[in-house]
Image (cartoon, rainbow, N blue to C red):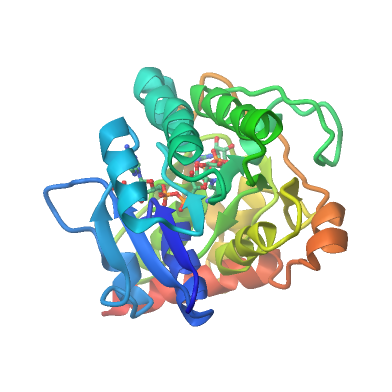
Amino acid sequence: MGKRALITGITGQDGAYLAKLLLDKGYAVWGGMRRTSNLNLGRLAFLGIEDKIRLIPLDLMEQTNILRVIEGIMPDEIYNLAAQSFVAVSFEQPVLTAEVTAVGVARLLDAIRTINPRIRFYQASSSEMFGKVQTVPQNEKTPFYPRSPYAVSKLFAHWLTINYRESYGTFACSGILFNHESPLRGMEFVTRKITNAVARIKKGLQKELRLGNLEAKRDWGYAPEYVEAMYLMLQQSQPDDYVIATGETHSVREFAELAFSHVGLDYRDFVKEDPEFIRPAEVELLIGDYSKAKEKLGWQPEIRFSELVKIMVEHDLKLISR
Ligand code: NAP
Ligand code: F7E
């Protein structure tokens, strides 16, 4: 019999790609989704798997819900991808962000401890925890310096994951994933905001693109490859933490330049800087060192920056044409 996995945040970018990967590996996959007034299965439908997932109401705000869901499924593995994941919003909603992104993880870890300590747990940690970076590049030993309520929340969850491992022997892993993007990326994140605008401008549906800090640099990878690393972490003999990244960094300006040039346009004719999108505190530079993941998991990225930009622009051009 195949393994049983519970994925929280199944409606998000990574939830969809991870579900596809686990289904392909023969897992029975339960997808936890919070209640919304509209069913939000677009990403699962895009991958053709919406009928293969056992969808289940699951909100990280509600401990009783978490306990009943885990007891009912008795999964072998839980992948916690649910979060208030948008850094900009976390400055406006710090309490909600902490409730979901930080305390939600305490609820999950403690439910595992209570119900079945043998369940393997993956926590979606983030390169945002490095914030004002203390070393370049960043690896598993780099000290943290979070710069947003989101990053502070993720850091709590990260340390709690380690704490449950050390205190109770939970098989709990933390993947410190650098930015990873795809055609399924949410529209508010800068990469998708740019590629969607490029497609709309090319088709005459939009005239300009308003962005914040063009000089911020990120290590952008391809989401379908990053979910493979999550899976690999839970298949090891010992739980551990891993940086997942490409080892390359590029600015938002470079992303825009390449995306516009892909359709024969000059970004300088369309991009306007708008203080509305400047954050109270910024993460200026991220670049990850994934050598531990390469050595221990045999993981390495294949899709690089220019290929990623191309995949996203071409997808959005097709989408807009429809
Ligand atoms: P995403 O697309 O924003 O998905 C987040 C998911 O969390 C959505 O399914 C969302 O549901 C769900 N969610 C939000 N609040 C919830 C709650 N109270 N209870 C249950 N579910 C809730 O994020 P992603 O890009 O797939 O990222 C997956 C995880 O990795 C997140 O934890 C993110 O913080 C982390 N991460 C992402 C990156 C990246 O570059 N993508 C890098 C490092 C870490 P709705 O659909 O209803 O909103
Ligand atoms: O911003 C700058 C912005 O919102 C990237 C999440 O998945 O990755 C993501 O967080 C950079 C920042 O992603 C706009 O100031 C400029 O420097 O795409 P983003 P993020 O904040 O890096 C990490 C790893 C996560 O864990 C998070 O969950 O781009 N930027 N102009 C802009 N950003 C946005 N969103 N919109 C702009 O107009």
Indicate left or right for 316 with 228 as reference. Answer: left
Question: Considering depth in this image, is 80 or 141 the residue closer to the camera?
Answer: 80
> Residue, x 82% and y 41% (percent of image)?
139
Question: Considering depth in this image, is 306 or 107 the residue closer to the camera?
Answer: 107
Residue 95 in view, yes or no:
yes
> Residue, x 26% and y 80% (percent of image)?
322
- Residue 151 in percent (x, y) is at 57, 28
Indicate left or right for 201 with 174 as reference. Answer: left
Relative to residue 15, is residue 126 depicted above or below?
above
- Residue 287 in percent (x, y) is at 77, 45
> Residue, x 67% and y 63% (percent of image)?
235
Q: Quadrant of residue 266?
A: bottom right
> Residue, x 58% and y 24% (percent of image)?
156
**Residue at the extreme left of the image, as rendered:** 37
Indicate left or right for 239 with 7 as reference. Answer: right
Relative to residue 54, is residue 101 depicted above or below?
above
